[in-house]
Image: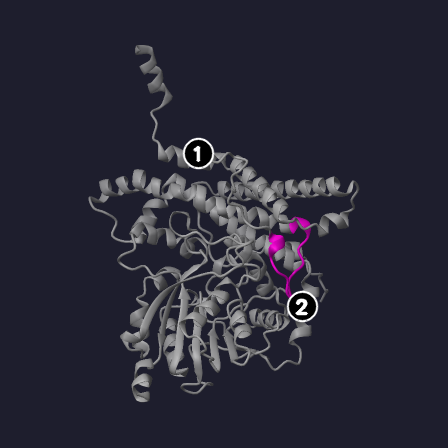
Amino acid sequence: MSNTTPTEQKLDVAPPYNAVAKHGVSPIASHDEIARFDFLANFNKFMATALSPGNKLAYDQRALPAFLKEHGREPKDRFEIRHAMNDDPFHKFWSALKRNSMEMRQQNGRAIVLRQIDELNAKARQYNEGRDTLELNPDIAVPRYQSAVDIHCMPGSYHGEELPGDISAGANYDCGIFATTGGGLGALTDGGGQALVDWIKKERPGWEPRRVLDIGTTVGHNIVPLALAFPNCEFIAIDTAAPILRYAHARAQSLGATNIKFIQANAENLSRWDDGSFDWVQTTMFLHETSGKALPKIIAEGYRVLADNGLMLHLEQPEYSDAMPLFEQFLRDWDAFNNNEPFWSSMHALDMKTVMTDAGFDRQELFESGVRAVVDREIFPEAPTGEDEDHGRAAYWHAYGAWKNADKMQEAAE
Amino acid sequence: MTDTPFDWMAAANKKAKGKRPEYFDDPEDERMLSILMAVVGEVSVLRERMDTVERLLDAKGTINRADIESYTPDKQAAYERGAMIREYIYRVMRGPHQMVQELEQSEPPVEEVSRELKEI
């Protein structure tokens, strides 16, 4: 029992949307638009903490006993649990509420962006026109894994345009992440990139990469902090979608990250770059938005362009290992089937260590690590993990990494 | 060809590509919940706007629309408004919240209790 009186208690509330930092292409939100995101941020918190525990109770008390009775055995995988839970009245209602929250977030974000789209496009042009740090290539096709459905129910996905040449996709994606994560990614939604900076400075103090490749960069959240931390390094950030790159480039320029070149390219084919031409190749929360055949190609190409003693690093949600209870796997799978993340489930069931050794790494070169978002804790909350985790969007990631041929380089030096 | 003006309100409502899952037996229930949740959100927006007006009036005595638009809560006000939204959410979400409590403690029907009381 808590021994504080209600007036003394510090409630767990989301930070206000006013705390979101502005950059050169931020849409300007009105009072009521801010209030919409304030509502959604707190509603998502409520969903994750007060309602989500009902799923396990419904499973243990209703869905599992019914399954055992019907099949005479335990469910053998997360899919069987999902089918059983899709009939449960609590899970159905919880899912319907959560889906609505995602749809509202998209509508609210798009309304802010689209009512001022001309001004935003004009701002972006100021940062983009005549700069050689943005390279768009109309020959790059949108891959099927990006076009089959609109990823995370974002109308138009990363490649959609409302007006020719606009930046609405990036602006909407960027401005609403606050609501989805309850502010867990910090003022510039870059808690992941800030975490990478902290991690590398501890892991390799004094290391100065010369060239870094960021694959599937979207709006560049996670690469800008690294580019600012390593101002003498050349950064290449690629994505298949031109609209998101226009926004990402303008955003990065306005934040002073002028050492990033944004290039429209597909990572399945990095042939324009020579073998061993990068010291660091990375993705952050990207691989689950690819496909079964594209993912190993991307890792293999990444391996090829990575220099000896170079770092490959991928941040993802944790994989569904045998040690993870099937119920937790089912809960983590919610976004796959309810929030348009069609490769999410298969990706998290992949053994990334095998994918990376197939690409050329030695098993002993591989490492795994947990990475938590680095944000201003005065204002922004630490993302809960465990019981209260908002599965699938907690600002806490699993890092899969490897230093290429580091042992051999060490031996050669000795 | 006519130059149709861009209707941002219609565009904001664009449906995401990909078939929407069906959660309820009756498709009308999906639509009703969508409308209801949008209204739930808008009531929260109105309440936050009222709070802004009240705080500005407390501080300044008289205000205009620009004051409302440019209002930024300080740390304490931001917390109090977060707590206000939280309280509101708990109130409107009482039904689903009590579904969790029902699962936590399975209870006999009141008819059963009624029969019991008759006998004791």
A208, above or below A352, in the image: below
Quadrant of the rendered image containing residue B37: top right
Check disc 1 and report the residue beneath it. B98
Report if residue B37 is visible in the image. yes
Q: Position of residue A314 (x, y in %)?
A: 40, 69
Q: Amino acid at mark 1?
A: Gln
Check disc 2 and report the residue beneath it. A121
User: Is disc 2 surrounded by few (<14), some (14 to 19) or many (20+) residues within 10 Å?
Assistant: some
Residue at left offset 61%, top offset 82%: A132
Look at the image and tell me in which quarter the N terminus of chain A lies. top left
Q: Which mark is residue A224?
A: none
The reply to whether the magenta stretch includes residue A21 is: yes
Identify which residue, A254 or A299, lies in the foreground.
A254
Label 1: element kind? helix
Q: Position of residue A185 (x, y in %)?
A: 51, 59
Identify which residue, A337 or B65, lies in the foreground.
B65
Label 2: element kind? helix
| Secondary structure, magenta segment, majority class | loop
Disc 2, disc 1: CB below 8 Å? no
Q: Which residues are magenta?
A: A17-33
